[in-house]
Image (cartoon, rainbow, N blue to C red):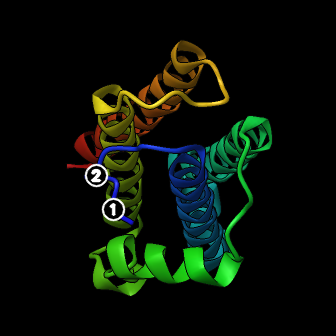
Amino acid sequence: MSVNQRVDSDHQLARLLQIGIVLEEVVEARAYRHYQSLAEEDRDLDTDVEALLEGAAEESAKHREQLEELIDDLDADSIPFEDIETLVEARYGRTKPEDFDGVLYDQLCNEETAYKFYDDLIQAVEESDAAFSVDREELLSRLRRLREEEAEGVEEVTRIMEARS
């Protein structure tokens, strides 16, 4: 299942929302891993980075809850977690934290990936003429809010990076 396809059923929509949940889990885990990797003395010096990573982890947790609420409202069965995890790894997990030159570059990639996922999902829903068991405008409104929060995350990381250069 690709986000680039039209979404024609509650089942497809639920699967895509579950991909979003796993993607948010990846973002949260990577932010937490980076936070843990900061040396104790770096935590005192890099309060902006520490706050960014904490905020990213908290935001991802909130996004997962919101996506779970949407899935609960759909008339669809959930897909086994392992299947979704495989899809996320194949599509979005091509990079690892150590592939980037620093915490901020990895976080920027994470934020941009989540933004792109929501942007693609919104487009797929907008291009669909399917009737979902949830209100289409409410669904799109929630997804747009998530996308906007990811855009704000991209801007925050960029701001911190620019301040350091």
Instruction: Tell me if residue 36 comes above or below residue 143 in the rendering.
Output: below
> Is 17 left, or right, of 149 in this rendering?
right
Q: Residue at x 58, y 81 (%)?
A: 83
* On-image quarter of the N terminus: bottom left
Alpha-carbon neighbours of circle 2 within 10 Å: few (<14), some, or many (≥20)? Answer: some
Report the side of 27 relative to 60 (left or right): left
Q: Which mark is residue 5?
A: 2
Structural crowding at the residue carrying mark 1, measured as other residues with C-alpha within 10 Å and reported as few (<14), some (14–19) or many (≥20)? some
Q: Who is closer to the viewer here, 68 or 24? A: 68
> Relative to the observer, which residue lies in front, 14 or 39?
14
Q: Residue at x 55, y 56 (%)?
A: 45
Label ID, residue 144:
none
Label 1: element kind: loop
- Closer to us: 161 or 106: 106
Asked if disc 1 and disc 2 are in contact, CB closer than 8 Å, the reply is yes
Tell me if residue 73 comes above or below residue 65 in the rendering: above
On the image, the x and y values in percent for residue 103 come to: 41, 67
Give the amino acid at mark 1.
Answer: Ser
Residue tagged 1: 2
Q: Image quarter for residue 70?
A: top right
